[in-house]
Image (tube, grey):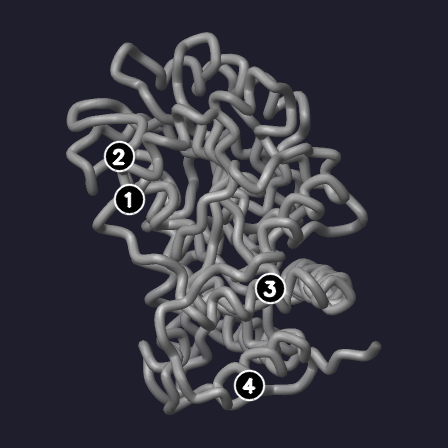
Amino acid sequence: MQFDFDKVVDRRGGDSIKWNLYGDGILPMWVADGDILSPPEVIEALTNRAQHGVFGYAGEPAELKTLLVERMQKLYNWKITPADIVYVPGVVTGFNIAARAAGKAGDGILVQTPNYPPILNAASNHDMVTQTAELKLVHNGNIINYEYDDAAFLGAIDERTKIFILCHPHNPTGRLMSRAELERMATVCVEKGIVICSDEIHCDLIMDGREHVPTAALSHEIAMNTITLMAPSKTFNIPGLGFSFAIIQNPELRRKYIKAQAGIVPHAGIFGYVGALAAYKHGDAWLQASNEYYAANRDFAIDYIKKYMPQLSITNPEATYLAWVDCSKAGIEGNPKEYFQKFGVALGDGKNFGAHTANFVRITMACPRKLLADGLDMMRQALEPLS
């Protein structure tokens, strides 16, 4: 089946936060929100449900958890049960519930930087302490990469540390953590009694035939210490449907997690259930094609920067559809995101991702190639006066 990912969908003037935040004349590439059509089976299922016309409280589809159990087995050889699955309206909600379930005010939450801003902010939501372990930045010409730093990880842990929120695959760097890295981090956490909350929202967005390894699938002991968060939202470009799920194989940890959300966190809605079921049941051909398209967008962006903006350095993502760009040698005075916006393109602001990332920007590449090319052209035009 052919999918037209080059089709430009007009999202201006509607209900899109991405396209409305900066108004007309600005090309938005700042948030992880795709500009491609969702799988046709998802669109059809949602349309059919909308035509029913009655939208009451929704019960979960009977086959959805069965599909998820089968998916974990098929993709990762990871055996879970339907009882291990807890639905949540979003992954950000999910790791904030984990903070409430596994810690209390004054406890520490371990995070790695750079990182997705809501992960960095989770501790402050609960009067907890953020404990930061820097990833090691490695330069290779125009390509940058980040590596796990064991000394930094161990050095960030103390007696207050109760939770480690792991972003895997990693946002914004696009790193797909190796099995050895995961085992090292997870083993340290098990030994020190630190609960792992593994945000794996990008686990289906894998490049170049690589394989994702869920943290909890490493061993039974690690599984008993881990809350895994996944979602169809980034995978099938349906974040607005508000549907995610946690996999918690430890019954006591699952009980605490469910208790922490009681009376506060809403149940999933009708369209979240319908969209998720259709996506997981019928969307894999679309997913494979979209991943190939994202990989081609990544290659296009890397080649463009090497050719036209060699003063920038860019990641070569192994996963996600995000590019992380170092602008420190570009001669920009002040904030790079604000500078590029003057030339018509809104990028992710690096200063929100960590203490040492103010000279970075993040580019969302889940879009028709024409939009990506337009954004890169605007960046090039912005840098020309600085050459």
- Please state which of the two labelled residues, at mark 4 or mark 2, is closer to the viewer: 4
Q: Is disc 1 in contact with disc 4, using a CB cutoff of under 8 Å?
A: no
Hey, which residue is sitting farthest right in the picture? 1
Task: Identify the mark nearer the N-term, 1 or 2.
Answer: 2
Is any atom of residue 256 visible in this view? yes
Q: Quadrant of residue 277?
A: bottom right
- Nearer to the camera, 204 or 140: 204
- Residue at image x 41%, y 10%? 192
Task: Classify mark 2: helix, strand or loop.
Answer: helix
Residue 158's spot in the image, x, y percent? 30, 12
The label shown at residue 261 is: 1
Task: Identify the mark nearer the N-term, 1 or 3.
Answer: 1
Task: Identify the mark nearer the N-term, 1 or 4.
Answer: 4
The label shown at residue 100 is: 2
Tell me the amino acid under the disc marked 3.
Answer: Leu
| Placement of the N terminus among the 4 image quadrants | bottom right
